[in-house]
Image (cartoon, rainbow, N blue to C red):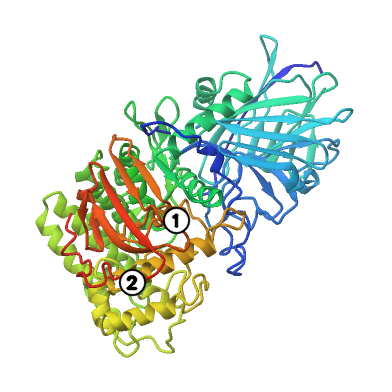
Amino acid sequence: MKKQLIQIVIAFALCAGFSAATTAAELPLTQFVNPLIGTKPNPVISEGYGWDTGNTFPGAVCPRGMLAWSPDTTHKNKIAGGYWYPDNVIEDFSLTHFSGRGVVCLMDVPFMPSVQPITVSPGSDWKQLAATFSHTNESASAGYYRVTLDNGVETELTATPRTGMARFTFPENASATVVIRSTGDIAVHGSEVTGSYHNTISGKKRSFVVHFVATFDHPVQTVRTWSGDSLSDEPRAEGDNCGAILTFDTATNRIVQVRAAISYTSLESAQADLAKENPSWDFSAVRQQADEMWNRVLNRIQVEGGSDGQKQSFYTALYHCFIHPNLLDDVNGQYPGMDGKVHSVPFGHHQYQNIPAWDEYRSLAPLISVLAPSETSDIAQSLVNYAEQDAAARPDGGGLPRWEQVNHNSGGMVGDGDDIYLASAYAYGATQFDTEGALAAMDKGASDPGTTSDGFDVRSGLEDYLKQGYVPDDVSVTLEYCNADFALARFAKALGDHQKYVTFQNRAQNWENLFDNSTGLLRPRDADGSWAPDFSPITKKGYTEGTAAQYVWMVNFNLNGLIQKMGGRKKADARLDHFFTKVNGGVSADTAFMGNEPCEETPWVYDFAGDPAGTQKVVRRIQDELFTAAPSGLPGNDDAGALSSWYVFSALGMYPEIPGVAGFVVGSPLFPKATIFSDNGDVIQITAPKASLQAFYVRKLKVNGKRWKSLWIPWSALAYGGNLEFTLADRPASWGKHSPPPSFDSVNP
């Protein structure tokens, strides 16, 4: 076969914008990002693949990037991020990844360089292409990944928002092959076009379709295809496991480069993405551009002081907060909607995908709303768009997607977290979206049983919740609805809808129907009202990813009421002390599991119990024990930045405790100085000159130059810029101990 340049286009289905901040002077902060953090089990917990590893991926991605090119190790069928640090074998390098999820997904369009002839179909045994490697021959940074496999092939990866670039350097005197796998139908069409050989490979899998285009810079010797066990020279193949095998002559040039792009709309859009974002063969320039994009994002928060390890933990956490949600629209603004039609976003805006509300509403949604209100407004509008498209496509549709992926609702997890996501975004200043459309969708999902999103019930068990004041046999779902109702009430009030405010504010108190005075816990009740039998603090039935002891604190909007039912602040404080005897006890414990979302807000409950020193002490302990600059440095699944955003807020000395209400309970800063730059130009400065692992107790606090005694800082004090001045010491102080506890009455937006 004649040597020719090759272009490959692939379409197949999936399983399941970057905007720059304006800062004063950019610091070189990408040096502190270590994408390997979260790829190894945390030593404080041993719960297995699904719980004890961050499930992040180390490969190349840009902020909010559609494409994420990363290595997949042999445990990829168990690890959602595709990469498990204890492995020493890489199977391939695929183009799509999800950061931190506990469920395996994506890892589509795998590429694998090989130095061995392919004599049997890779579909029969894809692992025949796998290669061992050592971490000593591996490095990862923001927007770049490199590894030299033990077979001598060096692989380097970098990315733009919608495209990626790989550089394979083959050893001397070795055969050079690149194998690409797809699923569904494959057709390789060849024709001479200005000296190049053009090939198109297409296919479908399930309901998600992604289109892929890749261009190689190196002459190709042969092209073969396979389907299942059949290897052929024919240009067409079909099946659930198929692909292409390319061989190259590297006698005079051992480096083979490939530029790749994806689109969820069309092959033409994928080609346009590649032409617009990655038109040349300058790998170093693409890598530098990715680094610059990340550096602008990271400079939204500039910290000073602290150790290099603490800075690595902090900036890697901030890095993880800007991977998801990620872009869905192409460079031409087109994207596939939830109605199956192609839509276009207005110029200057983006449609976002991969929005796991259950994971992100607690701390990530408030964080990105503060740092990037314009971008977060687009994320909010994306949710509204999905609801409106679904309403047009389905008779019972129009609800918000509970766990949105690509242009579908996966129906994952529980609750109605989008209500909190939207209400919090608005409260923190991300207001540039269709708020009336949002309120209508929120109200429909919360009020009309049977309302669906992409065929999934928005609120399972809603009819019982409305009639009985709880979801039978499920405490966690009831609590999720109570939190969502409270946030919905605040959002309605902010928009001037008093009737909805009263309705949902009252409904939020349904948690009281599950409080069991005999145990002091929130206990499941049957449909007839009877308490669930065989109950204890470690009961898991009726609690999503947790126990009764872990879920009792999830009344974030009315912790004062909860504490009163527990017998008062002293008793609640004592219960918290027991709860934090372990900070990562696991999903079955009666102690804290800080590696999972249900416990994120609990360290700050000490403030409501009149013991701010308790919050300060336990938060610093969690930071020190569970979040490190090592691959094992995340205490559980990061879940699209859920744990990382918790860490960012905790290091700043505050936390967004109350759903849908803009403001923070006070903790203790980790760094002597931190400056927050919002992309709207506002600046918040936090100083704590003596901050350290030992000095974390607050003795004094000033807000905007005035002495501050409250344990709550409303967002109104900081929304247009402000200053927090902490005086810290190495022993407990009386500051805040006798101040009135925060309440939802005193934190009205």
Neighbour tally class for label 1: few under 14, some 14-19, many 20 plus, Cα within 10 Å: many
Picture quarter with the N terminus: top right
Please name whichever residue, 77 or 339, is drawn nearer the observer in this view of the structure. Answer: 77
Q: Secondary structure at mark 2?
A: helix
Place of residue 565 in the rendered image (x, y in percent of width and height, measured from the top left): 25, 82
> Label 2 is placed on what type of residue?
Tyr
Kindly identify the residue that appears in the image at 56 percent across and 19 percent down: 279
Residue 651 in which image quadrant: bottom left
For residue 612, above or below residue 107: below
Q: Residue at x 35, y 76 (%)?
A: 552
- Decide if residue 109 is in sight here: yes
**In terms of secondary structure, where does tag 1 sit?**
helix
The picture quadrant where one finds residue 217 is: top right
Q: Position of residue 437 (x, y in %)?
A: 22, 44
Q: Between 183 and 50, which is closer to the camera in this rendering?
A: 50
For label 2, the residue is 606
- Vertical comparison of 617 with 103: above or below: below
Please indicate, yes or no, whether residue 383 appears anywhere in the rendered image: no
Left or right placement of residue 70 versus residue 318 in this view: right
- Three-letter amino acid code at the position of disc 1: Tyr
Spot the residue most to the right.
173
Left-right relation of 307 to 567: right
Which residue lies at the image location 56% right of the left edge and 36% below the top edge?
A: 143
Q: In the rendered view, does 275 fall on the left or right side of 658?
A: right
186 relative to 72, above or below: above
Q: Which residue is mark 1?
A: 647
